[in-house]
Image (tube, rainbow, N blue to C red):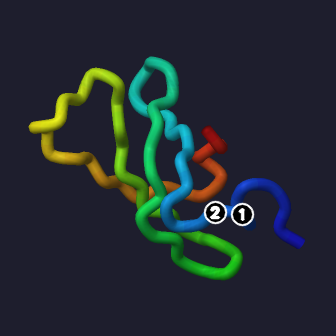
Amino acid sequence: MVKGIERQLQVGDTVLVPWGLGEPVPATVVEVWGDPPAHVRVRLRPPEADESDEPTVILVRPDAVTPA
């Protein structure tokens, strides 16, 4: 039985993703693969990014993200 956030992730959710040595950064879930989820694609929204920056999209394990 799967427990935790892995079972609850949906496209559009806001999550926190570990990024570098600092605090986790906010991200938006853009794709979820598998049932239960095996991979999650997220669009990072680091606080220092400005509107003209190209968005960073990465693939992570579902257990690497936490609800925001």
Vertical comparison of 5 with 44: above or below: below
| Residue 51: quarter of image | top left
Give the residue type at disc 1: Gln
Q: Which mark is residue 51?
A: none
Q: Residue furthest right?
A: 1
Quarter of the C terminus within the rendering = top right
Which residue position is annotated with label 2?
9
Mark 1 closeness class: few <14, some 14–19, many ≥20 residues within 10 Å: few
Residue at x 54% of width, y 38% of height: 16
Residue at x 74% of width, y 66% of height: 7
Residue at x 51% of width, y 29% of height: 24
Which residue position is annotated with label 1?
8
**Mark 2 touches mark 1? (CB < 8 Å):** yes
Mark 2 closeness class: few <14, some 14–19, many ≥20 residues within 10 Å: many
Q: Report, in whole angstroms, how far the alpha carbon at label 2 lies from the one at label 1.
A: 4 Å
Vertical comparison of 29 with 33: above or below: above
Q: Position of residue 12 (x, y in %)?
A: 49, 60
Vertical comparison of 36 with 26: above or below: below
* Residue nearest the viewer, comparing 46 with 19: 46
* Residue nearest the viewer, comparing 50 with 31: 50
Provide the secondary structure element on which disc 2 rests. loop
Q: Position of residue 26 (x, y in %)?
A: 47, 36
Provide the secondary structure element on which disc 1 rests. loop
Q: Position of residue 4 (x, y in %)?
A: 80, 55
Q: Position of residue 57 (x, y in %)?
A: 30, 53
Give the residue type at disc 2: Leu
Q: Residue furthest bottom?
A: 35
Vertical comparison of 15 with 48: above or below: below
In the image, taking residue 33 as reference, residue 68 lies left or right, namely: right
